[in-house]
Image (tube, rainbow, N blue to C red):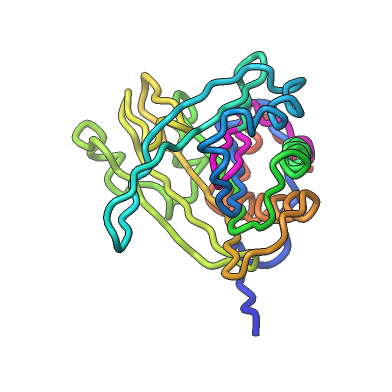
Amino acid sequence: MTKSFAEPFGGPFRKSVPLTSTPLVSVLTQVRFEEIKKINTDADFTADFQEAIRRHYPLSVEETGHLIEVEPDGVRRSNRRTLRYMNAKKTERVTLTADSVALETRNYDSRAEFYGRLKNVCVALQETLEPQLVMRLGVRYVDQIYGARFDARARYINPNFLSPFLNEHSDAIVLNTNKLVAQTNEGNIAARWGFLNPGDTHDAEVMPALDTECWFLDIDSATHHPEPVAFDPKAIHDGAIKLSGRAYALFRHIVTDELLVECGGDLK
C-alpha cells in the first residue's frame, strides 16, 4: 500500500503566490538517465543537441574532469565531460553529462514557464541523444533572506526553523545549519536551512556568498525510480510540476504569510 503523508509532505498543493521581490535566488531541476558513454568519449556526438537548443542557449562551455572507478580487476580512470549551455544574459543554463541533464535559472518566472523550458530541453535530448530510461527526477529551490528582512526574521520565519541561539549569540556564531529529510507522496524531500556569516555559502554552485549575514533555505524535492521508467518529456514535465508543488508546500510551512506580503505577494 502506498503511504499518504500529512501536510506539508502530503495533501493538496498550495496555490502559488507570485512575488514581485522574491527571496528566491536559484531554481534547478535535474533528470538522471542511464549512462550514455559516448557523451564522454565523442565530442561530435553532442553537436546535434547543442544545435537543437542553441537558439535559446547560444553560449557554451565544456569542462573535463576525471572519473575513477574501482573494479574487481583494478582501478579504471576515464574522462568525464560536463557541457554547459547558457542564455545570452547567463541567467539560465543547461548542464549535460553522460548520465544527467539539468536546467538552472537565476531568474525564475513561473512554474509553468520554467518547466515548459525543461520539457523543450528534454524533447531536444530525446530527438538527438536518445536516452531511454529515467532513474531520478529532482527539483531544487534556494532562498536567501538578508538585510532588513534578516533583521525582521522573527516575523518572517516559522520559529521552529530559526536558530535558538542566533539572537543572543550572533557575534559568536560562525555557522548554524540544519537538515531535514522526509518522505513525501511524490518521493522524498530534503531541506537545509540556517544562518551564514558574510562571505559564506553552503553551496557556491547554487547560492552566491553575500557580503552580509543571511538566513538561507535550500529545498530538494525528488522522485527516485528503483525500476527505471521510460524517458518521456511530458511525463518528466508533469512529474517536475508535482515535485515543485511539494517543495512549495514546505516553503509555505517554513515562512510566514507576512514574508509573502513583504515580498509583494497578494494573499487575497
14 lies left or right of 32: right
Q: Quadrant of the N terminus?
A: bottom right
Residue 193: image quadrant is top left
> Which residue appears at 58% of the width and 34% of the height?
95
Where is residue 262 drawn, in percent x and y?
62, 31
Residue 71: image quadrant is bottom left
Where is residue 223 drawn, in percent x and y?
60, 60
Q: Nearer the viewer, residue 263 or 243?
A: 243
Residue 17: image quadrant is top right
Q: Give the answer, above or below, for where 101 lies relative to 7.
A: above
164 lies left or right of 129: left
> Which residue appears at 36% of the width and 28% of the height?
213
> Which residue appears at 43% of the width and 48% of the height?
192
Where is residue 264 drawn, in percent x and y?
68, 30
Part of the protein shown in magenta: 95-113
> Which residue appears at 49% of the width and 33% of the height?
81
